[in-house]
Image (tube, helix red, strand yellow):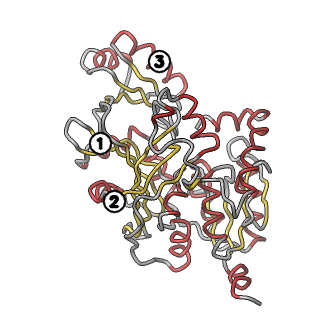
């Protein structure tokens, strides 16, 4: 038996939420190291399930619509699968697995090196994380927390416009409304409130400052073991949303802020923080913290910061040495459909740098050595057309 075959038998993981780019990044990262990988999703038309590194496909009930059935199915798969570790790649899946009711049951079968569900839920709440950051002295955009309609009237007379109304709990740009003046505020706030109760109101940081993401891994003692900074270059929607092109950079100032914040939260496992440079004072302002894997994970792997493998090793060994170095200047994009949509909607599409037709840039999905996920992404469009839940997820 070869070394790779032995490794495949010894290193076995289950990757959930196989629809997403980040899930494919985990499958490829560990698959290239000889891991035996099962990738799961509620549909067979999921990007990661088409990868050459996916040894088994696990189709399960919807974690959002059929939670009890999903958990029963997951427990059975873990009980018979002899998995070293499970990777929940979406926030809801992660919360289901790590809450106080389910974690003790699933812990019997595998390792789950992720933060407590209650802490993760708090961190995912933009009102909580903004209030927490303010209390701890971190720089954030001017933020208003609305308690009732009377409070809203008081705020409307004092804030400077334009402002953003942001859902406390959402992802991407879902539910965010830009308000230009006082006359729009009440109706816009009510519209967001109807779908996402008591959103926050936050100043718009002026144009002119770059946006940065920081990916982090903290051990079981809340000590930072890896961190990685990248700059957003393009996104969709063009006015603000998930990144479609990014570049690894060295920004120790931003890195240190993110590390300090997550350490103070007593965090464990993977997290992601986002910052925007305020051109008025040159300082990075915290926008949000995502208590999960982030969408542009493939960029970190391409730059030499292999978070999936580092997390796996931490889960298996209890801890790992700190990893501090990665390659700056590495670019990676999400072409299908993200950067295509950016190109269509950007009025300066032919002035973009790097240009849209620079196909030498690494991609989240497209790969010569693993081509089938590209087909998987295209065919998954059928799922979005006929499945209301998946259409909702696509908006993220």
Asked if residue 244 lies left or right of residue 386, the reply is left
Q: Against 225, is 346 above or below? A: above
Asked whether 145 or 328 is in front, the reply is 328
Asked if residue 12 lies left or right of residue 210, the reply is right
Q: Which residue is mark 2?
A: 250
Q: Residues within 10 Å of mark 2 (few under 14, many from 20)?
A: some
- Quadrant for the N terminus in the image: bottom right
Q: CA distance from mark 2 to mark 1?
A: 15 Å
Q: Residues within 10 Å of mark 3 (few under 14, many from 20)?
A: some
Q: Against 229, is 29 above or below? A: below
Mark 2, secondary structure of its residue: loop
Asked whether 258 or 219 is in front, the reply is 258
First along the sequence among labels 2 and 1: 2
Asked if residue 172 lies left or right of residue 145, the reply is right
Q: Which residue is mark 1?
A: 277
Mark 1, secondary structure of its residue: strand
Q: Which residue is mark 3?
A: 190
């Amino acid at each position: 038996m070869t070394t790779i075959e032995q490794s495949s038998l010894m290193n076995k993981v289950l990757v959930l939420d196989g629809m997403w780019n980040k899930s494919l990044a985990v499958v490829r990262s560990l698959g290239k190291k000889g891991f035996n990988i099962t990738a799961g999703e509620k549909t067979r038309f999921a990007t990661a399930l088409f990868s050459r590194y996916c040894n088994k496909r696990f189709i399960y009930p919807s974690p959002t619509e059929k939670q009890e059935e999903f958990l029963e199915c997951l427990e059975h798969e873990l009980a018979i699968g002899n998995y070293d570790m499970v990777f929940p790649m979406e926030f809801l899946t992660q919360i289901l697995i790590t809450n106080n009711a389910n974690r003790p049951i699933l812990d019997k079968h595998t390792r789950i090196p992720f933060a407590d569900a209650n802490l993760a839920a708090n961190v995912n709440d933009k009102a909580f994380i903004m209030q927490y950051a303010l209390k701890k002295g971190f720089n954030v955009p001017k933020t208003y927390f609305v308690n009732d309609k009377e409070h809203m009237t008081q705020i409307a007379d004092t804030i400077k416009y334009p402002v953003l109304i942001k859902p406390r709990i959402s992802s991407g740009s879902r539910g965010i409304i830009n308000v230009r003046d006082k006359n729009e505020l009440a109706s816009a706030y009510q519209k967001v409130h109807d779908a996402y109760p008591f959103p926050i109101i936050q100043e718009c940081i002026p144009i002119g400052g770059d946006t940065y993401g920081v990916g982090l891994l903290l051990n079981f003692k809340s000590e930072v073991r890896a961190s990685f900074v990248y700059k957003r270059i393009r996104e969709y929607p063009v006015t603000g949303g998930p990144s479609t092109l990014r570049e690894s950079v060295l920004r120790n100032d931003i890195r240190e802020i993110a590390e300090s914040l997550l350490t103070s939260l007593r965090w464990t496992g993977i997290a992601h923080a986002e910052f925007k440079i305020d051109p008025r004072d040159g300082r990075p302002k915290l926008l949000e913290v995502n208590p999960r894997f982030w969408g542009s994970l493939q960029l970190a792997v391409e730059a030499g910061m292999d978070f999936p493998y580092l997390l796996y090793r931490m889960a298996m060994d209890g801890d790992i040495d700190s990893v501090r170095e990665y390659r700056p200047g590495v670019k990676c994009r999400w072409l299908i459909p993200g950067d295509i949509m950016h190109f269509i909607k950007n009025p300066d599409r032919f002035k973009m740098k790097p240009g849209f037709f620079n196909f030498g840039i690494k991609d989240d999905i497209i790969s010569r050595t693993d081509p089938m996920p590209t087909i998987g992404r295209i065919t998954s469009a059928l799922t979005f057309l006929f499945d209301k839940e998946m259409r909702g997820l696509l908006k993220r």
